[in-house]
Amino acid sequence: TEDGAETDLDLGHYERFIDENLTRASNVTTGQVYASVIAKERRGDYLGGTIQVIPHITNEIKERISRVAKQTTAEVVIVEVGGTVGDIEGLPFLEAIRQMRREVGRQNVLYIHVTLLPYIGST
């Protein structure tokens, strides 16, 4: 990105597709989310409560998505939840976008599921 962030290659594809320069805020990783939640816990932001995936991790993910929307003039925010749907590591992200749909209204959210469909041509 222009602000020097090292991100997934997909971000470059999105930049070219939407003809916009994106920033480090446009790339959210599991490590960033957990590090932020741990830092908040150490500062006492959670008042000594037990950190849990729901609500702490999912709220952090939602905050990061919302922050990008607020920092830009975008009418639409495209969010790619990478990985494999069945993998446990991605579940907090899927839960966060599920919650966002309830919070912002289903008329404001569209999910598109994409998968590889191999094609082997006949010889």
Image (tube, grey):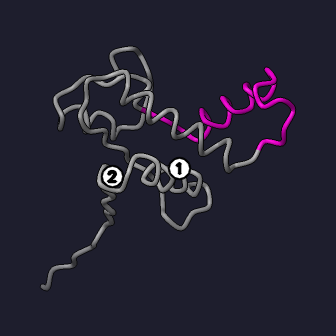
- Please state the horizontal and vertical placement of residue 97, each as a whole percent of the image: 47, 51
Q: Among all residues in the image, which is located at the extreme top?
A: 3
Residue 24 drawn above or below residue 11: above
Q: Secondary structure at mark 1?
A: helix
Quadrant for the C terminus, please.
Answer: bottom left
80 shown above or below 4: below
**Is 40 within the magenta?**
yes
| Mark 2–mark 1 distance (CA, rounded to whole Å) | 13 Å
Measuring 49% from the left and 32% from the top, which residue is drawn there? Answer: 64
Where is residue 107? Give x, y as percent.
29, 54
Q: Nearer the viewer, residue 108 or 7?
A: 108
Instruction: Count numbered badges in the picture.
Output: 2
Magenta region, residue range: 27-51
Q: Is residue 75 left or right of residue 54?
A: left
Report the residue that reaches farthest toward the right: 48
Which amino acid type is shown beneath numbered disc 2?
Val
Mark 1 burial class by Cα count in 10 Å: few <14, some 14-19, many 20+: many
- Per the rendering, the mark at residue 96 is 1
Q: Amino acid at mark 1?
A: Ala
Q: Is residue 37 a member of the stretch shown in magenta?
A: yes
- Residue 1 percent location from the top left of the image: 35, 22
Residue 110 found in image quarter: bottom left
Residue position marked by numbered label 2 in the rendering: 109
> Residue at horizontal 44%, vertical 21%?
5
Please identify the quarter of the rendering in which residue 70 is found. top left
- Sort mark 2 into few (<14), some (14-19) or many (20+) by Cα contacts within 10 Å: some
